[in-house]
Amino acid sequence: MGLLDRVSGWLSGGRTRATVLVLGLDNSGKSSLLRALRPHDSPATHGDHFSSGGVTFEAHEAPGAARLRALWERHFSNADAIIFVVDAADHLRLVVAREELQLALAHPELRARRLPLLVLANKSDAPHALSTAHVAAALGLERVTDKPWHVCSSSAVCAGGAGLADGVSWLARQLRDAAVHGH
Amino acid sequence: MTMSRWLDVEVGTDDIDLNSLPSNLALVDLHNDNEYKLLVGDFGRGEEMPKLKIFRGTMQMSDLVLPDLPLGVVGFYTSETMPRQCPVIAIAMSSCIYIYRNMKLFYKYYLPSVEHNTCELEIWKQLMDPINHNEESLRGLTASLQAIPQKVLSNQSQNFLNLDFEQRIEYLEQLKELPDRKNVEIVCITTMKINSVNKHGVSCLVVGSEEGDIIILDPTTFTPMSLAKLCAVKKTPYQMVATGLYNVDYRVTVATRCDPSICTHIKGKKQWSLTLEHRPVALTLVPIMHLGTTLIAVALASGHLHLYDGKSRRDTMFIKDVVSVMKFGQLGKEENVFVIITTNGNLMLKILKRTADFNADAASADVTTDPLSSEKPWLIPKRSKLFLEQSARERENSIAMHETFQHELNRLRLLAAKTLLEVHVKSDNSIAVGALEPIRLTAEVEGLGPVFRVTLIIENRSSTSAAAGLALLFHVHTNNYKVYKPYLKVPLLGPNCQLRLPTKVEEIFDENINPEIFLRGVTGQGGEGSLVKILLLKEGQRSPVLAATVQMPPTDPMMIPYDDMQTATAFQ
């Protein structure tokens, strides 16, 4: 925690800290996205920390391989927000992503809580990639009524990550609002 | 209704129209990126050319026009060099295998051609002769060509027979040289790993031909490494499965067209069968690695798709259409994908859920065993303490037990032999056994003496034939006995009939009566002279057919007519 962070934290009247759980199937681009989110000047030891809109995020990336997906639920209890990464170009496995998201959201640790859910339709630059609306429909997000959710397209490969900043700032706003309402 | 174990993938059905066979489906990691592609050797419909269509997930990536109908599509690795090369694709067509590397035609392998049948060749020689190019002689020649069995006939001849007269003449006039060799058609194709069962291990091609040959091709030079003939009598393979490793030990199991049997055992012995509700239309294996089970998928004409684990049904899916081809394996990055092509040409993809479980005891498992085929498990009682003690005792004293058993067994045998001998000796008395098997003769003796009533019971035990021309004769010592009717004619004896023939026999005592007679026992047998022989005679036969001996009882001492004898001697 640098001096500048402390000063800015003091200026903003106490920063909000949040643990965000990054979920998604294998090869959906979770690690690349986190790399894109990490501040460029920060040393490697900084880990998966990034901040946006006055919220400092600590990201936990869960492995996405089929045999490791059962471990996701171990991270549920201390998560404040969820980022779900979907490969928008992998049409075949959209149903698998939908199934895994539904399983996660139906888990007792998450069902009762009003966590913000950010869905990233990743690899939006790939040919045949689906639009955010398509991804939202394919994942059945319209049925998620107990949590605030947001879908944005992202691409870790393109510099800046097109909709990524957008999505993270939405997440920050949600968390700040929740903190205000909570106090 | 239990929750489905499968996730349906939405496939845009409009532009996909597939017409294929099970052997023409392959799941291959075409670009070595662990993203498996679906390769379909498509026949096309109507005028369309056959194509090799490559699907990436649900989307068709590219296609490749094929010169002929594909018979089998396989993908395999030809070298183990690093960096790993992409797998090559082999497509069998007619008598040739096209080998594609990086989707470019790389090599064509032609099956070795064989000599024509000599009769066929002779006919073709005559057909080539312009003298025979008239309707009369052509008809004769085609008739003799038709007489050759179809499976011996070359393609050229078969095509020729399908032409009409004008076309035949035209064809023959165009023909420049005699067809000397015929091409051998490929029937089926598969791959077999050479050295290791590794996913990326080098494989060789195994080709089955119309001639009944199995040829194994070297993966680098595409020359035959080994060749096997199926059978002395020509048998055409239909499908084959290669198991094992070429350099270690392998087995190629071939189903031939001649006997359409489905074997469930390596030695071709039928192990069990299931009765299906409808006609099966497709069959595939469903190996699920992470569950360690292999299920059998059977698609029925009714549109149902059943998954069996051994004999018990584990899952049922309903496909809206009738399945034409199905295959299970890795597609894209997903390991457990069911690829189904329906008769309408639609492609359906089903992904096995990560949480799916096919255990019989899982709560969600839909275990419905067929009541017709399932047998009740044997009721094996639990091992009791008594049983355990007994088995322990048997283990400890096995030798002593065996010796005791043998001893007892020998005693039993001896007893049985003794009894048999006794019965044999005794039966000599009343029951006669002889050459005329179905006739039985028994005798009953009644009375205290000196006049006894002897009843002979003659029985025809045959159920079909009657006995005729029989007679009975008493053979006695005239000093001892007097038989009132020594010769008895037996009337016709019907099958299963019994006759009782009574007669009187009197014991004779001479004048010098032995006082010992008065002292002999009543119940015992008479002396040596007390034997009465009865002979059964048959007309036309010199020797008696049956003989029985009756031991007469002694006359009761009280009944001996002593006084009569005394008076008789007194008169004398």
Image (cartoon, coloured by chain):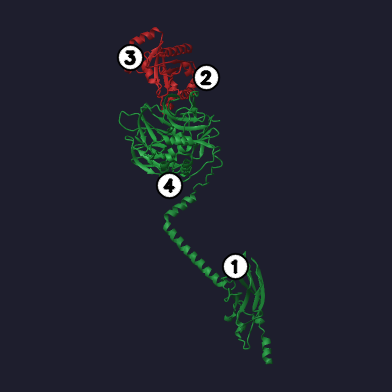
Q: Measuring from the top left, give residue A1's x and y in whole percent.
A: 34, 13
Q: Are marks 3 and 4 in contact (CB under 8 Å)?
A: no
Report the Cα–Cα distance between label 4 and label 1.
55 Å
Q: Is disc 4 in contact with disc 2, using a CB cutoff of under 8 Å?
A: no
The quadrant where residue B426 appears: bottom right
Residue B176 lies, in percent from the top left, at: 39, 36
Chain shaded green: B
Q: Which residue is mark 3?
A: A42
Q: How far apart are labels 4 and 2 at the CA level?
A: 66 Å
- The C terminus of chain B, quarter of image: bottom right
User: What number is the disc on residue B233?
Assistant: 4
- Which residue position is annotated with label 2? A143
For marks 4 and 1, the one nearer the N-term is: 4
Tell me the chain of label 4.
B
Q: Are marks 2 and 3 on the same chain?
A: yes
Q: Nearer the viewer, residue A23 or B231?
A: B231
Check disc 1 and report its element: helix, strand or loop. Answer: loop
Q: Amino acid at mark 3?
A: Ser
Give the residue at x 66% y 83%.
B560
Q: Colour of chain A?
A: red
